[in-house]
Image: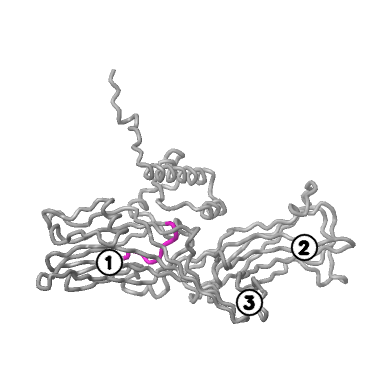
């Protein structure tokens, strides 16, 4: 017996319920992986209705802006085209004379499944070009004055790094770290980038070790620049435009890795001195008097407001390069001059979507993975360790769509206010008052 429901407008009469509104593409677009995207179409019928067909489409489109103009006359300022399309007929009446059917009053549900190839382009949300996906359901009603019922739901396609099947048979798992060693006359340098796959707005650690080979060696400057190159193409119009943006990443914290047993007076730089080393050209920090320079520098990458993620689409090609420049000076007594030595390292890195910063990039430590119990009470959830990355609006919206519980959502909101309070406190150097537990009450 059909369910009798009150009257609904067209906007509420047809809905699309998705099992997961986000599709995670794993690995590169060359990996032969197929994902299942499923849900159901719900239709509420308040009176007998004649229909001819119920269908659903999964559509992907690319949209680009061209302020300089494209086309034969150069008057076309934007272009949009379909890059992927799948159709499924959920209900039809091929055996009926008029290929029509009557739905009695009630609630009707049609499940659907789409097979999503890993070769699809991930969602791109650049200011000048974008790639977006959505599903749309259509109910073709029959009759005089009857219109089609339509419903649309947006779908996110995010790409995360994943090891290939060859890694399972290899003797060792691949690593995303990058290490460069230089043996120079002035010093021996080692630069270690701990991870080359990182999300925007997260922390990016780099370890630098400088061991001088002569006296009177000074460290003048360290520069870390992230370059984003965007190339937009439209082969059908023979249009091409490229942009290059440089971002000087800001330093967040510094850790001295020098073993105190090796050197009696190890080089110990404060945060103020380290910021001076990053911002000026002639910091003139001696290396020979206090031993080697061995520090772990943690930088904060720009957030998604300014930085895009690396793409795999040839028509919207976004790539990132990390440029490290270290400048040293050494005195030459025989010539009574000062020689400058430059150490440069340029390497490509992968910037992931900002919505992947916690789920697939900031992994917990071994101790946290063993001791963390998913079934905790509310007070234990509030005392959890902050993530340490920028909570952008799109990340918060993404977490709301991923069916998080009310307690998880409150933890995200409280954590956002906590991080904002810490940033404001560091900005004005305000010393917080002591806690009540640290004060001994004298009776």
Q: Is residue 57 left or right of residue 180?
A: right
Residue 261 is situated, as x and y percent measured from the top left of the image, at 12, 55
Q: Which mark is residue 119?
A: none
Q: CA–CA distance between discs 3 and 2?
A: 38 Å
Quadrant of the rendered structure where residue 351 is?
bottom left
Identified at 77% across, 54% down, the residue is: 10
How crowded is the residue under tag 2: few (<14 C-alpha within 10 Å), some, or many (20+)?
A: many
Residue placed under numbered mark 2 in the picture = 139
| Closer to the camera in the image, 191 or 413 | 191
Residue 105 is situated, as x and y percent measured from the top left of the image, at 81, 53
Q: Which residues are magenta?
A: 193-201
- Circle 3/circle 2 CB separation < 8 Å: no
Kind of element beneath mark 1: strand
Kind of element beneath mark 3: strand
Residue placed under numbered mark 3 in the picture = 70
Identified at 53% across, 76% down, the residue is: 314
Compare marks 3 and 1 and give the one earlier in the sequence.
3
Above or below, 433 relative to 297: above
Compare marks 2 and 1 and give the one earlier in the sequence.
2
How crowded is the residue under tag 3: few (<14 C-alpha within 10 Å), some, or many (20+)?
A: some
Residue placed under numbered mark 1 in the picture = 326
Identified at 15% across, 67% down, the residue is: 331
Kind of element beneath mark 2: strand
Identified at 71% across, 58% down, the residue is: 109
Q: Is residue 305 left or right of residue 179?
A: right
How crowded is the residue under tag 1: few (<14 C-alpha within 10 Å), some, or many (20+)?
A: some
Residue 366 is situated, as x and y percent measured from the top left of the image, at 33, 55
Q: CA–CA distance between discs 3 and 1?
A: 43 Å
User: Which residue appears farthest toward the top when viewing the image?
Assistant: 443
Q: CA–CA distance between discs 2 and 1?
A: 64 Å
């Amino acid at each position: 017996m059909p369910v009798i429901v009150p009257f609904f407008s067209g906007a509420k009469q047809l809905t699309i319920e998705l099992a997961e509104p986000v599709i995670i593409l794993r690995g590169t677009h060359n990996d032969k992986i197929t994902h299942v995207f499923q849900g159901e179409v719900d239709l509420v019928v308040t009176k007998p209705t004649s229909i001819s067909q119920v269908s659903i489409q999964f559509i992907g489109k690319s949209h680009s802006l061209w302020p300089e103009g494209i086309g034969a006359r150069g008057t076309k300022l934007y272009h949009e085209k379909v890059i992927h399309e799948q159709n499924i007929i959920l209900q039809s009446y091929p055996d009926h004379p008029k290929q029509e059917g009557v739905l009695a009053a009630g609630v009707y549900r049609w499940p659907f499944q789409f097979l999503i190839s890993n070769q699809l382009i991930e969602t791109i949300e650049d200011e000048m070009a974008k790639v977006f996906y959505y599903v749309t359901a259509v109910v073709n009603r029959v009759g005089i004055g009857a219109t089609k019922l339509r419903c649309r739901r947006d779908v996110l396609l995010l790409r995360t790094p994943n090891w290939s099947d060859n890694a399972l048979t290899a003797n060792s798992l691949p690593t995303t770290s990058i290490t460069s060693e230089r043996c120079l006359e002035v010093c021996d340098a080692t630069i270690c980038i701990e991870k080359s796959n990182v999300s925007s707005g997260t922390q990016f650690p780099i370890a630098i070790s400088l061991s001088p080979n002569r006296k009177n060696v000074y460290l003048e400057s360290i520069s870390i620049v992230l370059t984003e190159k965007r190339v937009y193409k439209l082969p059908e119009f023979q249009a091409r435009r490229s942009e290059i943006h440089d971002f000087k990443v800001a330093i967040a914290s510094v850790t001295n890795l020098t073993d105190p047993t090796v050197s009696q007076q190890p080089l110990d730089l404060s945060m103020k001195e380290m910021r001076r080393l990053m911002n000026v050209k002639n910091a003139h920090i001696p290396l020979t008097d206090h031993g080697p320079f061995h520090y772990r520098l943690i930088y904060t990458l720009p957030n998604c407001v300014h930085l895009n993620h690396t793409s795999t689409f040839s028509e919207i090609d976004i790539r990132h390069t990390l440029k490290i420049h270290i400048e040293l000076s050494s005195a030459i007594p025989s010539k009574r001059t000062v020689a400058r030595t430059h150490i440069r390292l340029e390497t490509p890195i992968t910037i992931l979507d900002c919505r992947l910063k916690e789920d697939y990039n900031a992994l917990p430590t071994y101790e946290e993975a063993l001791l963390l119990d998913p079934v905790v009470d509310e007070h234990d959830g509030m005392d959890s360790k902050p993530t340490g990355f920028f909570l952008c609006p799109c990340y918060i919206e993404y977490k709301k769509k991923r069916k998080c519980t009310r307690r998880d959502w409150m933890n995200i909101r409280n954590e956002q206010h906590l991080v904002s309070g810490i940033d404001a406190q560091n900005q004005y150097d305000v010393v917080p008052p002591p806690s009540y537990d640290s004060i001994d009450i004298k009776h």
